[in-house]
Amino acid sequence: MTNTVTLTIDDLQVTVPAGTLVVDAAKRIGIDIPVFCYHPKMEPVGMCRMCLVEVGRPQIDRETRQPVLDEHGSPVVQFGGKLETGCTVQVSEGMVVRGVTEKVQAGRNEILEFILTSHPLDCPICDKGGECPLQNLTMAHGPGTSRFLYDDKIQLAKHVPLGELIYLDRERCIQCARCTRFQDEVVGDPVIGFFNRGRSLEIVTFSDPGFDSIWSGNTTDICTVGALTTADFRFGARPWELNAAASICNQCPVGCNLTFNTRREAVSGGNFVIKRAMPRQNEAVNEIWICDKGRFTSYHFSESEDRLTQPLVRVNGELVPAEWGEALDIAAEKLGAARGSLLALAGGRLSNEDLFNMKSLSDHLDGQAVLDTHVAGGELVAAYGLAPGSNLGDLGPGDAVLVIACDLEQEAPLWWLRVKQAAERGATVVVANPRLTKLDRSASHHISYTYGQEISALERLPEAFTKARDRVVFFGAEGLGLAGSARLAKALAELVSGFERTGMPNNGLVAVHPHPNDQGAWELGFRPAADLAAAFSAAGAAYLAGSDPLGDGLVSEADLDGLDCLVVQDLFLTETAARADVVLPAQAYVERDGSYTSGERRVQRFFSAVPEPAGTRPDFTITAQIAMRLDLELESRIAPRAFANLAAACPPYQGLTYVKLARVEEQFPIVGRGDMYYGGTTYENSQGLGVQLPLQEGVVNAWDAPAVQETVAGLSAVPITRLYDRGALASRSRTLAPRLDEVQVVLHPKDAAALDLSSGRKAAIHLNGGSGMEVEVALDPGIPQGYALVPRSMGVPVHRPVGASLRALEGELAA
Amino acid sequence: MPDYILLRHRQIPDLDRLEVYMQHGGFEAFKKAVTTMKPEEVVEEVFQSGLRGRGGAGFPTGLKWRFIDKNNTPRYVVANADESEPGTFKDREIMEGNPYQFFEGVMICAYAVGADTAYNYMRGEFWELAHVLDDKLAALEEAGLLGDDLFGTGFSLRIHNHLGAGAYICGEETALLESLEGKLGQPRLRPPFPPSFGLYGKPTIVNNVETLANVPPIIEKGWQWYKSIGTDRSPGPKVFSLSGNVEKPGNYELPLGSTFRELIFEHGGGIPGGKNIKGIMPAGASSAIIVADEEALDTPMDYESVQNVGSLLGSASIIVIDDSVSMDWLVKKTLHFFKHESCGKCTPCREGTYWMTHLIDRIEAGMAGPDQVDLLNTVAQNIEGKCLCALGEFAIQAVMTGIQRFPEDWAQPEPVAAD
Amino acid sequence: MNQLQQKYGPEIKKILAKYPADQKRSAVMPLLYVAQREKMFISKQDMDEIAQVLDLKATEVASIVGFYTLYHDQKEGSSRIQICTDLPCALRGADLFAEELCEQLGIRLGGTTADGKVTVEGVMCLAACDKAPMFQLQNGSGIYYHENQTVDQALELVDSLRNGS
Ligand SMILES: Cc1cc2nc3c(=O)[nH]c(=O)nc-3n(C[C@H](O)[C@H](O)[C@H](O)COP(=O)(O)O)c2cc1C
Ligand code: SF4
Ligand code: FES
């Protein structure tokens, strides 16, 4: 147990852990001490001086070292002559803090007057107006009139792009340094900083591209004024016009809690549209942060012009619009006819409810329910994953984290942050990867190996890991195909099953899946196909939802030729959909209710934020409507009921209801609640913290690694994962578009030299002797020789190690 | 003239050459400390001497050394050679004329606190001097006085010069450490103090150049000898930098407790041009200005007495102001200095110095009414007691005392109606 | 190896040796002096290269350039005459000295001679208050004090700087 300290703040007694700062102690009992520079997630700096309080400490007798008592027997409390900053003073036993005296009020008013001398007071045109700490605190402490001559104000640039995502208004900045400290201290990307000094301090970026960090959006949430705004939202709406809908980010398996802000807009025919994505607090998941991909990609795609809004059926070789009833009839008839040879292929962005209905239909038709993924081991995670009660935020001294075959910051940004913080608290972090990744900065051990040698790398685990108390293992599929991933997962499951504390919270295996609900799909019985092309060739009919194997280069057109019927359910007319016999327009997750199961096996709800485009239906509804035509009763209308059916049928989910998922409890730091000055504009979580699934006893329906050889002679192209890829959703974000990575291939400088290639050079890559695709060359001396690293979802279909050849394209030396 | 203790180069030619310094007993104290005394004994000797920091705050040096965190290594010594307070130029003369005595002080300090690396942080403007001192350090290494296993005792020490690049705030010890770490020179929160959390987060002693130059004679001659100089609570010799409206500006080494009159009139030759003395700034631009009446002139220059007349001795940089100087002009000078040097970390200093310069510019130009003088005073008061470091407090001293103690200098014309 | 390293390799190594191996960042200020030597200002490329040597972000290096007055991020005079016009020197005529010098050169304080060679500016106290009027000359090779100056002496120096001697 940590020591506690009891003190009095404004006549209220509070007991808090030793080491707590006065501002935090006050906040816990609902007393507001105004702050600007202080943020509960960062070290105190005492810069703005707004949090002034009077602090008294019990007088201690020098001889006896006991508190001196007055005639009534109560301790004599001595107050210093100066006001102190509540954000920098740690509580001590018997301390008395006064925040409402005249002296304190005067002090705070004076500080606020100072801050306002250099502020432009352009609230009427400021995006932050309505949720602005400075505006709110000015209401409380500001002077009624200005003694500072308006002419003395410095005029500064008001629209400074710090790169494509974030804009700076230099006049509004009050130099609280929250943004620069966040970038440095919290996420380790000090790419914005102060320039000059004194009153001339200004925020600058010298990175290329500007503000080169995947975390930049968070600075706009904690900015104390309207100095930093996102390119996404600036001049977009007034905060008080916005509605809030709780959601979950659908970009990676972390499952960051989001709030979508919406409002009605004339341009959308008076309909609600999403104006921005904001983080929503979940201290066990994303705390109060989200990455820029989540912020700028999680909803734009739903507004895309090319959304499907009408079913299509193939008539005389052409896809033509059809009525829903007609399309469903055809789909049901054809799929029903393929009983025993149905391939049901699902993508990991479908919700639990969608997947449950799809699996039920597949089972009904004796089909094969297949998950479209490149990371194996989800069924092992169900048995050896993180037990309920796990919170990466609890890892600390004596604990250890292993991350293998994964670039955690790029694949699951928030997990990277949480593991980094665990390292800062004293946990051992071991990174096993052929190259260095950003997590290595936090790691005490790096295990290097050549692609394909993952399992033997495990023999080199340091004692700091093998002897640790709580141990978490993250694994991805860097450099691996599905078969390699499965073998690695199996080896890791064996490792984890041998942990002393296996089954206890914060011990276990986490698969760094490519999609938000891959883990849910595994839990619900979906398994990957060892050879997807073969599975298609063998199938009589295929029913696809949220998956585009043709577009992703997982199968060829020829593989689909043998199908009697191909039914595709999607948001867009994907390459696969264009080949389908029936195309069914689905709803985006922001348009409906549902739930996801995160990689940490936390089931979390998302809520409908905006109305669906006319003509679209939720995936689970469409499946149920097909099923109904095949005499299978599935819930078609109400998501909670679909979830209830799922919970009744699937053991891991037993007993869960939407109501349980919606439970919340008090979290610290307190955010939102109308006083943004403290935690920022992150939303308070009032819609549910989710529930972690219990571990399954033993592995259910283990998926064995297919015996394919995954090594090749000569230069071998291997897949890696990048955050800013060109996948279906990211490429539809207008905000993020300029930041998306070039189609790159990463080579060792020596290999590049041998091929006469240099950094930035354009080259043609040929896979397995196929036709050439244009890529840009990047160099990394940290990767093993003989490999060409190809990011996934960038148009070059490398799904497992394949032989590759590269040749320079003429005269294309980049600037 | 009594023998110099600090400015010995004024009596001994070429004292900046190692062999000359050695001929005059150089490094005997260091050798004595390292070969015959325990580190704690060195600390005790300095503590007993009553030596107080010469960088401005007058903090007891031995007490600071006692605070060093013995449970953490490595430990560092950092000499504060930032010397940027307007009117201060004593450390420069010591480093130019008597560099080895200063380094010997650094070395004894390092031994006393168990540091094996020391840095001499000099203001960037001392660029030429830094190159000279680099050679001095090389000479010390060559002579076996710096390096590994000194005198065969296993004690090792290296000293490096480090140049700042133009920032007064880097004289503040925690800003100095930040700067030395390659960061912006902005002060840290205190506590923790450098003896427990200093350079690179390690236990560190930061002392002023002059403070350190006092150490070798203390070790050599003992604390009793040292305490016999100066006053009881402010013992020892002090180098006073005398500047401004005075006949013979320069550094004067006198015992602490000598009077202003003695310094300004006896040594400094009085006020030139037949003018009268009007005010004294005893601690450079950071001073509360003392009205130079007879009583003030007879005040002993020690930490306590100067405080009693409403100012601080600080670094003892005595700026003399004659009666041709108007305080609004003077305050304009100091405010522009502090506005220029405010690091910008905390609100009252950053915004307040900026605001005050705008007010004083108008006041000094005769373009502001009396209410603006009141406002200037109010702004200064509002800064008081709220800053993160002492610079903000320094900035308001001349403003507040200039207005209060010299009210006649602030008579403002009635504002002219604009049309 | 970047250009800075190619040019000043041994010197950079010597500088780095002063600081603990895991505290390379301490070398940022000395390296900025090195980078400034040739052009009397620090370019974006210099910052990038120093950042590379010290495992920093260019922005972190830029912040240092911005904070300290002896680093310059813009091309101005290849020599800078920096006259102390702070209080103690001003009490001994420094403002007048600065004014006269500028008048003779036909520039304003803070300005640069037409040939782009000499910038004259007022600066804060240089710890030479007893030797006013005084200034420091900052150029690529270093910083040099000139004390107890007359305007004529200063003009002579400016002449020699402008004539490239
Ligand atoms: C704004 C400011 C500037 C300072 N400048 C200097 C300085 O130039 N030289 C110095 O030795 N101390 C300076 N100090 C004092 C140092 O913070 C510190 O007290 C001193 O270096 C301690 O050494 P000492 O105990 O030997 O005096 C300054 C303090 C402040 C607040
Ligand atoms: S008082 Fe001035 S110099 Fe000191 S921290 Fe505040 S802004 Fe910086
Ligand atoms: S100083 Fe305490 S919140 Fe800024």
Image (spheres, rainbow, N blue to C red):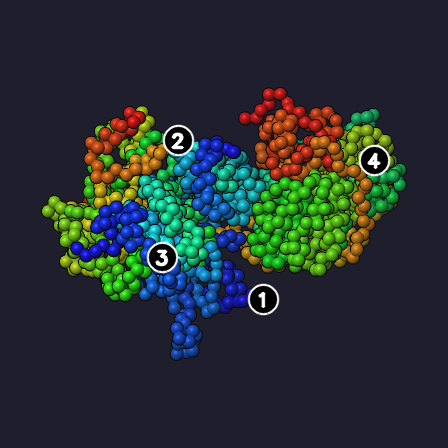
Say whether residue A642 is visible: no
Q: Nearer the viewer, mark 2 or mark 1?
A: 2
Q: Quadrant of the N terminus of chain A?
A: bottom right
Label drawn at residue B31: 3
Is the CB–ligand 1 distance for label 2 below 8 Å? no
Residue position for label 2: C38
Is the CB–ligand 3 distance for label 4 below 8 Å? no
Left or right of B126, for residue A612: right
Say whether residue A630 is visible: yes
Q: What separation in Å lies between label 4 and label 3 (alpha carbons)?
A: 85 Å
Residue position for label 1: A1
Image coordinates of residue A241 in percent, x first then y, are 55, 45
Please report, as a chain letter, where disc 2 is located: C
Q: Residue B340 is drawn in which quadrant? A: top left
The local secondary structure at tag 4 comes to helix
Tell me the kind of residue under disc 2.
Glu
Tell me the kind of residue under disc 4.
Ala
Q: Is residue A638 above or below residue C44?
A: below
Residue position for label 4: A534
Q: What separation in Å lies between label 4 and label 2 (alpha carbons)?
A: 67 Å
**How would you rate the neighbour count of disc 4 (Cα within 10 Å): few for under 14, some for 14-19, many for 20 or more?**
few
Mark 1 and mark 3 on one chain: no
